[in-house]
Image: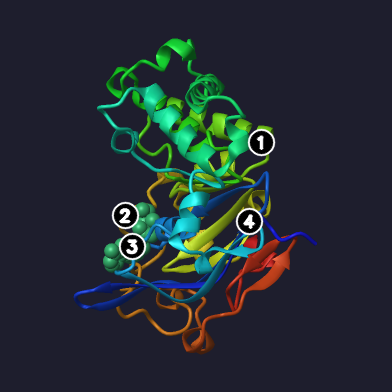
Amino acid sequence: MAPPLLEIRDLHLRMTTSDGPAHVLNGVGLSVARGEILGLVGESGCGKSLTGLSVSRLVPSPPAHYPSGEIRLDGQDLMTLSERRMRALRGRRIGMIFQDPGTNLNPTMRIGDQLVDAALAAGRHAPDLLGPGPARPAARALAADMLERVGIASARQRLNAWPHEFSGGMRQRVLIAMALIGRPDLLIADEPTTALDVSVQAQILTLLRGMVADRGLGVILITHNMGVVAQTCSHVAVMYAGNVVETGPVAEVLEHPAHPYTRALMAAIPGRNTRRGTLKGLPGTVPDLMAPPPGCRFAPRCPRAKAACRAALPATRRIGPGHEVACLDPVAEAADA
Ligand SMILES: Nc1ncnc2c1ncn2[C@@H]1O[C@H](COP(=O)(O)OP(=O)(O)OP(=O)(O)O)[C@@H](O)[C@H]1O
């Protein structure tokens, strides 16, 4: 059987601080297939962004240190690649979109020039992207085509626009175009719509779904919003304090959440208030990653925790089609009623 597009296994990440190492990723495991949008969710500080950045190998080292783990793209372990080979993959096989379009577009460069630069950079590692002729005109044609695909009218003329002439939603569309211009296989989108108002957010997510259906790329969509997951993702991975505690197809996990933490996150949906502070119905706060509790990191807040939960990290077990949970006492369906 072919390996999944992306597979992360047992990824540990420590960040060196002046007070000692922070154990920020504690054996993360997840996978993404082509054509799949995996929502990566969890409270602020649980390690979503560092997981995404680790895939692109963009966490500077130091302070980052990876004691163990594998990150495989089509079976190839990215952890063992040289920086030179990683640079060839970024933008070409792995596209990235971050939260704030204001900080990711260069305000002093026209939109078209930024797209052309991205196309030329990707083209250096994929000669077929720009064809056999002169690279710059081909990159410009590709830039106009991508801008049109992300729904910007009069794309050819708009290439001459400056970022400040575009609205926030349009700038985010440009960033999507830029991330996809090298025809990557994997897209990592870190809170791509959080800074946008709700209607623009819905448009961008619809656009992303269309691109996935069109191109069959795999996506990690990092969000703190379970509503976005329900509307946009095919799969979900729930993170807590550096671990994936539950993962599976969205319908399966949202209908039958088994980890007590997933259930608490879902109970918080109506207020959409999972970003900072406490969760509704859940006492306590996320653990200090400088001195995390032994065993299951959720145990100190878990209403179902027993002694064994505090002794060792629970192994992941399969509880439904593609549905896995890292819990010694997952909530069974019968308990739902
Ligand atoms: N340079 C650093 N040094 C030490 N700790 C760090 C560093 N960068 C991040 N961390 C810690 O790593 C943990 C995970 O951070 P990360 O940004 O991945 O969380 P997140 O889930 O994406 O949060 P948010 O939803 O707020 O973006 C946090 O507790 C954070 O404080």
Give the amino acid type for the residue marked by disc 4 in the picture.
Answer: Val
Q: Could you tell me how far apart the alpha carbons at marks 3 and 1 are, in whole angstroms?
A: 31 Å
State how far apart marks 2 and 4 are (Cα).
Answer: 23 Å
Q: Can you give x and y, in whole percent of width and height, for residue 115 in the image?
A: 43, 29
* Disc 3 residue crowd, few under 14, some 14–19, many 20+, Cα 10 Å: few
Q: Which residue is mark 2?
A: 276
> Closer to the N terminus: mark 3 or mark 1?
3
Q: Earlier in the sequence, mark 2 or mark 4?
A: 4
- Residue at 48%, 62% (x, y): give it: 239
Helix, strand or loop at mark 4: helix
Callout 3: helix, strand or loop? loop
Cα gap from disc 3 to disc 2, whole angstroms? 26 Å
Give the foreground label among 3 and 1: 3
Q: Residues within 10 Å of mark 4 (few under 14, many from 20)?
A: many
What is the spatial separation of the Cα atoms under label 1 and label 4, in whole angstroms?
26 Å
Nearer to us: label 1 or label 4: 1
Colour convention of the picture:
rainbow
User: Residue 303 placed where, x, y %?
Assistant: 47, 74
**Label 2 crowd bin: few (<14), some (14–19), many (20+), radius 10 Å:** few
- Quarter of the figure that contains the N terminus: bottom right
* Left or right placement of residue 125 versus residue 165 in this view: right
Residue under circle 3? Answer: 60
- Label 4: which residue? 253
Residue 236: which quarter of the image? Answer: bottom right
